[in-house]
Image (cartoon, helix red, strand yellow):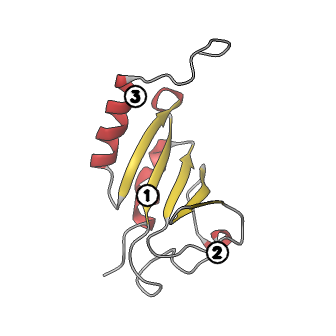
């Protein structure tokens, strides 16, 4: 919709797909947006747990073992949006925005957000 006077385009199909994907993902996935006709995804997930029971809480991004094609691009902490850098440390209740270029690795990403028992 470039070069038009339209500010926002809403696709009921895209919204429905994202809502369904968020319900079937493991962990605490809040939103999923299908990209590149389903080949990639943008995911918003909430980090729960404590430093001792989470694979990512208290760790800088450079120490988090992400699957190939996965990038944490932003951290939403309260009302702040933090652009992700190698030294950004994840805290409990952060909302993490992840771009996943190959959705075959979605299970590995979802496991990162599950708190260890």
- Point 36% across, 79% down: residue: 116
What residue did someone put label 2 on?
A: 60
Q: Quadrant of the C terminus?
A: bottom left
Q: Is residue 24 above or below residue 53?
A: above
Q: State which tag comes first along the sequence, 3 or 2.
A: 3
Identity of the residue drawn at 65% across and 16% down: 2
Q: Position of residue 44 (x, y in %)?
A: 46, 52
Label 1 sits on residue: 45
Give the alpha-carbon distance from disc 1 to disc 3, as whole Å. Answer: 18 Å
Label 1 and label 2: CA atoms lie apart by 17 Å
Mark 3–mark 2 distance (CA, rounded to whole Å): 33 Å
Q: Secondary structure at mark 3?
A: helix
Viewer-proximal residue among 110 and 97: 97
x and y percent of residue 58 in the render? Answer: 56, 81
Question: Which residue is denoted by mark 3 in the rendering?
Answer: 14
Badge 1 marks a residue whose secondary structure is strand
Q: Residue at x 31, y 31 (%)?
A: 16
Q: Nearer the viewer, mark 3 or mark 2?
A: 3
- At a point 53% along the width and 54% down the height, the residue shown is 97
Q: Earlier in the sequence, mark 1 or mark 3?
A: 3
Label 1 environment density (alpha carbons within 10 Å; few <14, some 14–19, many ≥20): many
The numbered disc on residue 27 is: none
Asked whether, in this view, residue 41 is left or right of residue 21, the answer is: right
Q: Quadrant of residue 74?
A: bottom right
């Amino acid at each position: 919709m470039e070069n038009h006077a339209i500010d926002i385009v809403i696709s009921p199909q895209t919204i429905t797909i994202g809502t369904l994907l968020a319900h079937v993902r493991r962990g605490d996935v809040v939103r999923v947006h299908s990209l590149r006709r389903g080949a990639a995804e943008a995911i918003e997930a909430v980090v729960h747990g404590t430093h001792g029971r989470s694979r990512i809480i208290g760790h800088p991004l450079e120490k988090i073992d992400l699957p190939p094609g996965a990038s944490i691009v932003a951290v939403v902490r309260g009302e702040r949006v933090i652009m992700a850098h190698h030294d950004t440390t994840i805290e409990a209740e952060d909302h993490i925005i992840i771009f996943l270029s190959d959705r075959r690795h979605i299970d590995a990403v979802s496991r990162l957000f599950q708190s260890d028992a």
